[in-house]
Amino acid sequence: MSYLWCRFLVLSLVILLAPSGWANPVQVAIPTSDTKDLTTFIADRSLLDIDNFHQTRRDIALQVLQRQALLLGGYTKPLESREVINNRRILTLVVQGKVAISGISFWLSGLENYREQVWVTDEIIGDGSFVVGMYTTESRLKSFQVNEDLHALVPISNRSWEKDWQALLQFHRREPIDTFNWESVVRMLVAGRADYTLAPFQQTEGMVLNAYGQTLHPIPRVKFLIPGSQHWVVSKIHPEGAAIYRALQLGLAQLKAQGRLRTALTEAGFYNESVIDWQTVNERFIK
């Protein structure tokens, strides 16, 4: 037997007998626009040591909470983020089994056609809880008139954010400006291409939202309600899907029981007592 052939056999055995930690990391699909914020927020900390979410936003908080839930549920295989251009593509990859899990949550109403391909977790945000602000630039905010007709404003969103899109369409009776990701939304607002977008209220002074070097402000005293519940989705086709789903459900139950899920979302500004008495401007348009 030649030396090269023996070497090949040895290497093959090493790979076959290698511990699971040597395996390729399991991919979690996240929006490209979230990658930098997620990496910066986690930094060099252990995931389970993160217990303060004041310095981040809902999307990033939920991605960290998801990974904490997996660990709490007993899933310890390495994970890596796979950057994906938008939410619709993320769901497609999970449905096809090309990634095991989505790092972002989805509305339950948008998952009914995929029940054979994905597992849907218990709710992470309940129906009637998803309240957001109408965010605009400082210069546009200064030009608002006291009795300005909100219906006449030009909103901007992303068509793949289906619930936002539906709420805006129902309120304005026309389609919002469509752009491809969150960074583009911010850039186009600053450029004056639209008047406002929907975004979670922030736990910052004045509830200002800082993104991509820009600052957005909520239009005072008004808020939007987005009906429905949100859930994480796991691929039934991916080989790690079943184990991930079981662990995620167990860990999510722990986060809820300990109050950590609600606390984290409150710290990230999603649940905001400052806007409890603000007017829900689209309430009568909700179907």
Image (spheres, helix red, strand yellow):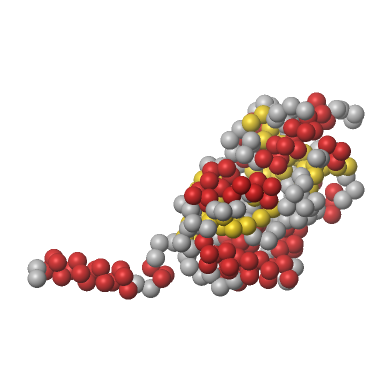
Image vertical order of residue 208 relative to residue 120, above or below? above
230 horizontally vs 5: left or right: right
In the picture, the quarter occupied by the N terminus is bottom left
Residue nearest the observer in this picture, 31 or 209:
31
Residue at screen point 59% across, 71% down? 73
Query: Where, by quadrant of the figure, is residue 219 drawn?
Result: top right
Image vertical order of residue 192 relative to residue 116, above or below? above
Residue 169: x, y in percent? 74, 32
In the picture, the quarter occupied by the C terminus is top right
Residue at screen point 58% across, 44% down? 87
Residue 69: x, y in percent? 61, 66
Residue 24 visible, this orientation: yes
Residue 66: x, y in percent? 61, 61
* Farthest left residue in view: 1
223 horizontally vs 160: left or right: right
Residue nearest the observer in this picture, 36 or 2:
2
Residue at screen point 75% across, 38% down? 167
Residue 221 visible, this orientation: no
17 horizontally vs 48: left or right: left
* Farthest front residue in view: 116
**Exactly how many numbered labels are in the figure?**
0
Query: Where, by quadrant of the figure, is residue 262 drawn?
Result: bottom right
Image vertical order of residue 148 relative to residue 124, above or below? above
161 horizontally vs 287: left or right: left
Residue 70: x, y in percent? 58, 67
Residue at screen point 76% across, 45% down? 226
